[in-house]
Image (cartoon, rainbow, N blue to C red):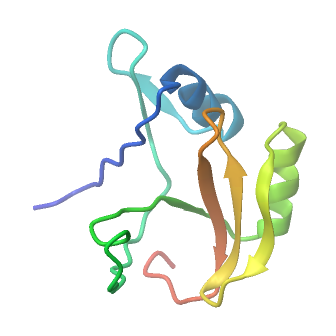
Amino acid sequence: MINAVHAVIYTKQADAVRAFFRDVLSLHSVDAGNGWLIFALPPAELGIHPTNSVLEHGRHLLYLMCDNIEATVEELKSKGVEFTQPIKDAGFGLLTAMKMPDGGELYLYEPKHASPLK
């Protein structure tokens, strides 16, 4: 039976992005060999969204969740994180995005929807 999820982020700057997850986001990791870090993630939930878009079909997104987006944004800003979008109400929750070292965006949101995690 399925007992976990292994998510993957592809980047041309793996060392910088790994350092961001380790040092800035403070996620615990193990070295699987030769500096290849595998990170523990917080508990997760999965939403299955319908789409008619050719660009969205088959695409997967990673969102980090928090209980208080304003406090989390301030904490991450104090660690030098740059946010690429202001906090906005997206209906399902309060949403923003941060810049990763490779220039990619990583979404952060405070959910307003019911969660199976609580």
Asked if residue 75 lies left or right of residue 55, the reply is right
Horizontal and vertical percent for residue 47? 38, 78
Horizontal and vertical percent for residue 73? 81, 57
Q: Quadrant of residue 19?
A: top right
Asked if residue 40 lies left or right of residue 15, the reply is left
The relative height of residue 86 versus residue 115 in the rendered view (above or below) is above
Horizontal and vertical percent for residue 41? 47, 49
Q: Quadrant of residue 4?
A: bottom left
Task: State the residue at coordinates (46%, 75%).
Answer: 117
Horizontal and vertical percent for residue 42? 50, 54
The relative height of residue 32 versus residue 113 in the rendered view (above or below) is above
The relative height of residue 62 versus residue 68 in the rendered view (above or below) is above
**From this viewpoint, which residue is outermost toward the left?**
1
Asked if residue 110 lies left or right of residue 115, the reply is right
**From this viewpoint, which residue is outermost toward the front?**
54
Q: Quadrant of the N terminus?
A: bottom left
The relative height of residue 58 versus residue 33 in the rendered view (above or below) is below
Q: How many marks?
A: 0
Task: State the residue at coordinates (37%, 69%).
Answer: 55
Asked if residue 1 lies left or right of residue 63, the reply is left
- Nearer to us in this view, 38 or 14: 14
Task: State the residue at coordinates (85%, 67%).
Answer: 70
- Nearer to us in this view, 98 or 39: 98
Q: Quadrant of residue 78?
A: top right
